[in-house]
Image (cartoon, rainbow, N blue to C red):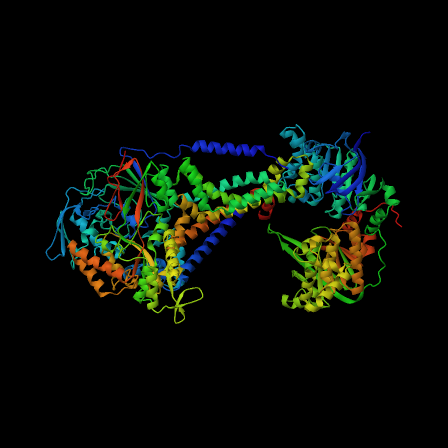
Amino acid sequence: MPHFPGPVALLSATILTLVTACSGAVRQPTGQAGGRVVFATDKEPECFDTQVSQSDISGVLMRNVFDSLVSRGQDGEFKPWLASKWSLSADELTYTFTLREGVKFSDGTPFDAAAVKANYDRIVAPATKSKYAAGLLGPYAGTTVIDPLTVAVRFTRPFASFLTAASTSYLGIRSPKAIAADLCAGSPAQQVGTGPFLFASYTRGQQVVLTRNPSYNSAPATAAHTGPANLSELVFRFVAEDTVRVGSVTSGQADIADRVPPNQVGTLKNNATVQLTSSNTPGLGYQYFLNTQSPLFADRRVRLAVQQAFDVDRAVKAVYFGEYERAWSPLSPATEAYDASLVNSFKYDPAAAAVLLDQAGYTGRDAQGFRTKAGRRLTATLLYVPLYTPEDRRTLDQALQGDLKKVGIELKLVPMEAAAYEPVRNAGEYDVIAFAWGGSNPDLLRTMFDSKNFFDAGGNNACRFTDRAVDDWLAAAAASTDPVARKDLYGKAQRRIIDEGVSLPTAVSERQLAVRSAITGLTFDANGWPLFYDVERS
Amino acid sequence: MIALILRRVLAGVAVMWVAATLTFAALRGVRGDPVAAVLGPGALVTPEVRAQIVSEYGFDQPLVVQYLRWLSRLVSGDLGWSYQLGQPVTEVLRGQLGPTAELAIAATITAVLAAVVLALLTAGRGRTTRSLASMAELSAVSVPTFWLGLVALTFFSFRWQLFPATGAGSLSALILPAVVLAVPVAGVLTQVLREGLETALAQPFALSVRMRGIGPVALIGRHALRHACISLATMTGWVLGSLFGGAVLTETVFARPGLGRVLLSAITSRDLPVVTAVVLLVAAAFTVINLLVDLAYLAIDPRLRRRTA
Amino acid sequence: MTELLDARGLTVSFDDRAVAQDIDLQLAAGECLALVGESGSGKSVTARALVGLAGPRATVTAERLQVSGEDVSRYGERQWRRIRGSRIGFVLQDALTALDPLRTVGAEVDEPLRLHTRLGRTARDAEVERLLTECGIPDPERRKNQYAHELSGGLRQRALIASALAAGPALLIADEPTTALDVTVQQQILDLLAKLKRDGHGLVLISHDLAVVAEIADRIAVLDRGRIVEQGPALDVLSRPRHEMTRELLAAIPGNRNAKPRQVHRQGPAVLSVRGVSHRYRERSGQYRQALARVGFELARGETLGVVGESGSGKSTLAKVILGLLRPDSGDVLLDAEPWSSIGERDRRRRRREVQFVPQNPLGALDPRYRVGSVLSESLAAIGVPRSDRLQRIAALLAEVGLPPELAVRRPSELSGGQRQRVCIARALATDPRILVCDEPVSALDVRTQATVLDLLADLRDHRGLALVFISHDLAVVREISDRVIVMKDGHIVESGPVDDVFDHPEHPYAKELVAATPRIPAVETR
């Protein structure tokens, strides 16, 4: 039957030609003075309007386009940025900013007090549909233009977190000329700020290209240099797949890889061309919230039994290859007012857990070895949405499930579709749910544990925790501008949360970045987010 | 011929109309608040925004009026507004169709070429060759695209640096994803084509041809291949169409823009206006492809020409 | 004179099983040798072995195998290819499938020219036209650009012959070249082959039908179970058959055998009346074609009406109307003087069992996945035979059509052509019908099987008192079984009457033409 030496030869020839033609297709990023840096990150902004969006990546990306009034270093100190100085009124209700002179938006509009007012007023306007920034402004009362370079921001009650909020890119200032109803789209005409980079182009599903703002003259005092950025071009490339992101950097196709997964950290440590940099992520790490209103966890003894039955050290070590520390507080160590005294404040003790469960009346055992009380098995449900639950977290869930089984508690992991999950969650029909929440402001504790902040009220109190003392401490801390008092109040709240066993922290997650050796100057803000203004290619 | 094209275009318009009607039904058939369906889950909006959506979609109008309005908006190219993304749907889809078509077409061409070569090499061969070929095709079909993409990247991009790992818009960035996407398709097409070749070779005319002294190469090249191309065209059209909305894994691994990813994220976030638009786009792609397949039939098989003349 | 073909002791076997054994064949230029035998007798595989195409699994051995004086017995595939088309031309049956349907007939005729000659494009073009003309195709410039399906059955068979002749082979092998053709067209093709013979071609003609080869064969070789059982000059073989198989083949030729005397003729009133039935189809082109024009006849119990005509004459449309599957534009069909074609489908369904159908192609009419028993059981169930009685009824039906009961567990693909047709007849009988419509029921069968199936139908008609509508293009077959006959052309009945009257004294020119075209064995003496 047929015999074809021809096609095979032809095919190999074709492949050879293609290969030859395409080698050299991978160009090293080179370019104009300062060069180009490609930052490969995992998420893509769904909306570029930081005044509307709540996503981290929008904040990280647009930080390069929008400046804020003040800058906050990793030490937590506030430094001048668009505002050269500021003061707080005696009644703690009004912040007055003196603005930097001679700053222009990249469309030529001068930056002035009216621009600040236009921005802040827009953020709180209902038509803006802000998902996050409006919340950052808290009890915002209004902004008053005193003179072109002096502006007063007023609140209805003392609001100590305002400077922190004002330092984020969510309260970044965009050109009033480019302010319209809907600014989510990634079009250069919409995204106009005073920042070190200009929004040049966006290809959905692929990348955003930012180019240097040649007339930039408003660098924050926290930065290492002034004037235009060092890089001529900065590319945010959206690469969801971990392996590809890391491979892009090791092969030189990208310069910085965001969020290197712990399982790849080991191999990168031996790679001479790539350095690993990490920043601790402030906020609440991945933790389990026990629903204090579920029949099971209404009993504090059962919550504490779970706390002592979970071998967190072993689970975290196994899941994160020994790269991450275990957590002791609901807040991660990088967060302001983190209470370090919680470290080693409780321990893994299944025997003690068993005693607690006996006390709680779960003394029977069924055929599968689970504890029972009055013939009913000790069963808890953990709801999760597979789509939003990365593999490492699922493995942690399974570790918890295994540990609990050892003391006779059955933990059912119940996957749910996102849409179905929400109403069930809002109604509190679960025993356990788990998530993480980033942010440098310890006021986060309020949306997580304040009794007024249940899900259906728009908060995130997943424990359905109702503790008057905690409510009061958190309110007082938020209103206080005294760092010592704040630290004390937040510390009390953290200790109570652990004492009550309502939150079960897991790991202190770090944001690991792989950076090629030629790249220097990468810094992080108080959120642990990367800053590119000082980045250089040598 | 022209009449046929006209008929197919009309049929295509009908298909589009059905698709539009179905998506309308899906949008309005959602139980509960239609405004919530448009907005997606968990959205908290002011009464003003709600009123704007109601008037824009005409939810206060009778169903028939809403339907006609919906159709006329689609005809004028207005795909609506994604409230979740805060931008017009056309803005969301802009720049997605090109890379999608590019990838789908490149992958299909690669797969067809591979299938032709492989089918020619294996058609009518002995049992060993055939079972080896079947095994290879089965593994090609069942190999996870995601895994294959990562392996291809590891070697061709990260290690040997022949192709860029990510991106779109250049030929070199297209080759890896197209080949990865083509592998399972080639597996299917090879089987279809070989089966077609063998069916053709079993027909009396093949014996006639051999009795003229024609060798196997010319028998396949001049006669059987053309017969086999009929089923190949059918399958290729189907594959090409399905790649328009269904290349999401490849798009993800290679960080390429594309309708598949837009559709997936729209579905998971229940962004119905975007889902609707992508569904309509894919339906349109299928319509065009079907027309092309029909024309291919006519070009291949003269017997169909008379019947449709 | 050199022999064009000289084969001695030719043996073809598959997996050590000989399907043709010790075949001796010689053929000179201008001579026609006919290979005749039943299906499965080894005639086709012998013919294919002569061009080296017996199949990849076949083993071919011969004491001598020469083509035009050249020893081809040790030829490899490459050498065979040089011979095929240039020394030996081969014509298969049914040009619709034997020509590549996707290529123009011109391209098909051109192909051997390209391969075996050094002619240039224009010269080949002229040669293609000459060949088409030689094979009796008028207007070759136009025809060569047409496809097989665009030509009539006769023209495309001529084109197939032209393609076999293109590279000038002296030897032509034709395997059942007229089997799928209407009787008048068959005659034309036989005339063409006779002309080629006169022009000096050597011809090997393969057929199951002695009547077909009788006209042009100089010598006849009769095959039975892979061996030549009788070989000699055509007249000798036909007039003084020595072997039993030859005699059986001769006896099986319709009209040539001693049909059983009719015991029962027309009994009582008409069970089927067709009155002034007209029907026309709208074709794709938008034109109407008259398939039936004022057709009328009556049929009584135990009577057979033959319906004769070529393809397209309206025979199959008439069958559909009688079966109640097609409502005629005008006219009536009555069953027992009660309306049939004009009533609603629901009313008709109650009486469907009374009118049954026997198809031409039993393989296509039987679901390949159903066993014979299931096929019959389904029909029995349709008329409400309880499950418990069915096995017994199935056995009785099989016995009635002359099949052993163990066949009930076989599938259609495991049966011979004759057995399949018997299963179809049994299925038709399952509902206890009164009228049987048979559309070309024996055309797909070879002569001997044909004869046995015809006998079966006649028996059933007589024993059950069936009224039979027997549709065929084959006059001899129709004559053998029918009482009366109607001849159809373009939807009209052009002649009708008692069968012997019509065939012995045809009046309409078309009827005359049909009768004249029927192959006959000249001056044959049978026992």
Q: Which of B306 and A177 is in front in this view?
A: A177
Q: How many labels does the image show?
A: 0
Residue A388 position within the rendered picture, expressed as x and y whole percent measured from the top left: 36, 54
Q: Nearer the viewer, residue A327 or C90?
A: A327
Residue C474 position within the rendered picture, expressed as x and y whole percent measured from the top left: 77, 51
> Looking at the image, is A90 positioned above or below residue C224?
below
Quadrant that contains the N terminus of chain A: top right
Drawn side of residue B39 relative to residue A70, left or right:
right
Drawn side of residue C400 relative to residue B57, left or right:
right
Residue B143 position within the rendered picture, expressed as x and y whole percent measured from the top left: 49, 46
Camera sees residue C314: no
> Looking at the image, is C264 positioned above or below residue C230?
below
Drawn side of residue A239 relative to residue B218, left or right:
left
Drawn side of residue A281 relative to residue A424, left or right:
left
Camera sees residue C268: yes
Rendering quarter of residue C370: bottom right
Residue C60 position within the rendered picture, expressed as x and y whole percent measured from the top left: 74, 38
Q: Nearer the viewer, residue A24 or A346?
A: A346
Rendering quarter of residue A9: top right
List the single residue furthest toward the left. Answer: A90
> Looking at the image, is A213 positioned above or below residue A89?
above
Quadrant that contains the C terminus of chain A: top left
List the single residue furthest toward the bottom. Answer: A374
